[in-house]
Amino acid sequence: MASAAELNTKHGIAGVAEVVDGNGGLAKVAVTTSAASGEMYLQGGTVTSWKPAGADEVIFVSSKTKWDPACAIRGGVPVCFPWFGAKTGAQAGDKSAPAHGFVRARAWQLESIARRGELVVVNMFIENDEGTRKLWPASFRLTQRATFGAEMGMELVMTNSGDVPLRYEAALHTYFRVGDVNQVRVRGLDGVHYIDKVDSNRVKPQSGEVVITGETDRVYLNTAGTVELEDPAMRRRIHIAKENSLATVVWNPWAAKAKAMSDLGDDEWQRFVCVETCNVGDYAVTLSPSAQHSMKVIYSLALV
Ligand code: TA6
C-alpha cells in the first residue's frame, strides 16, 4: 500500500487537501478550506471530522479509538457493508463474521481528491479480494464520495462487478457530537414504525420526537424522510437529508453498554448520538450484474 507521502504527491492539493499520517500512523486526507475543515481516513473510508467555518466539530470520535488497521474506528462515519449488525442471508449465524460487515475495518484506496470552488470532494473505494470473498462470495466495488464544505455530503456508490445479482445491506453509521445526549431531540420520525432492539425487536410506531432516556437502538422502517437532530446544549440543529435510503437508525449505548466498550470512554456516551442513513433488513438492496446503487446524505447546520 502506498505511503501517505506517496499518496500526497499523487493526489494532494497543497494547503487545501493533504494526505498525512493520522492517528496510529493510519493515512488520512486532511481538508482545510474557507468553508470547512474535515478528515477522512483510508481505514474503512471513514470520515472522522467535519467542522464548518465558525462552528464546532460536528462528528464524534472516541478518545479510546484503537487506531488499529484490523479494527473499525470508534466514531466518525463507519461504513457498514455488506451486512448490518450480525451477518444475514445465506451465511446467517456465521459467528466468525464481523458485525456490520467487513469494509469498515479494512484499508480502502484513495481514488481522487478534487477541489470545486470552496468544496473538496474525496473519493475512496474498496473492491473485493481473496479475503473479502471468503466472507462474502461477491465481486463489487464500493466508493465513498465525501464532499466537504459549508454542508457535508456523502454518497455511497455500490457497483456489482460480478455476473450474478447481489443483495446487501449498507449504512453510514454516523456519530454526531452533541453537548448532552439527555437533551437531544430527533425530529422527523413521528408516526414511523421502528424495530426496538432494546425491547425484543418489537415493532412500534414513533410518537412525536425521539428523545434519549436510556439505551436506545431503533431501526426506523420505510422512511425516506429528512430528520433533524436538535442539540440544545450546543445550541444547534443538524439537518440530515437523504436519498435512496429507506431506513434510519438511532442509537446511543447509554452508560452500562458504554462501560463495556473498551474503545469508548466511560462518560463519552453522553457526547454523541448515532443517526444512521441505511438500507437494511427488508430494505436491503438487490443489485443486478453491472448495476450501480447510490445512497446519499447531506448534513447542514443551523445555529439556534
Ligand atoms: O447502529 C446501532 C448498532 O447496530 C447497535 O446495535 C450497536 O451494536 C452499534 O451498532 C455499534 O456496533 P459496533 O459493532 O460498532 O460496536
Image (spheres, helix red, strand yellow):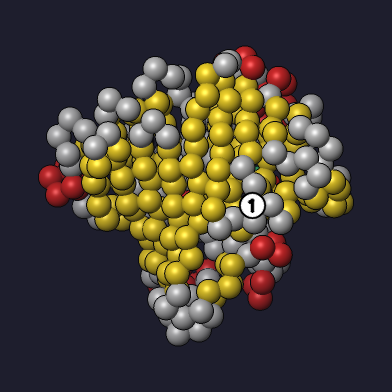
Q: Note whether residue 53 is visible.
A: yes
Judge left or right: residue 245 versus residue 103.
Answer: right
Q: Is mark 1 within 8 Å of ligand 1?
A: no
Give the farthest residue toward the bottom. Answer: 163
Residue displayed at 40% across by 53% down: 144
Q: Note whether residue 197 is visible.
A: no
Q: Quadrant of residue 267?
A: top right
Q: Is residue 2 above or below residue 304?
A: below
Residue at the spot of label 1 = 224
Q: Is residue 154 above or below residue 162?
A: above
Judge left or right: residue 114 versus residue 105.
Answer: left
Residue 75 versus residue 183: which sits nearer the camera?
A: 183
Residue displayed at 14% across by 34% down: 14
Quarter of the figure that contains the C terminus: top right
| Residue 41 x %, y % | 36, 42
How would you rate the neighbour count of disc 1 (Cα within 10 Å): few for under 14, some for 14-19, many for 20 or more?
some
Residue displayed at 45% across by 85% down: 163
Residue displayed at 31% across by 55% down: 109
Quarter of the figure that contains the N terminus: bottom left
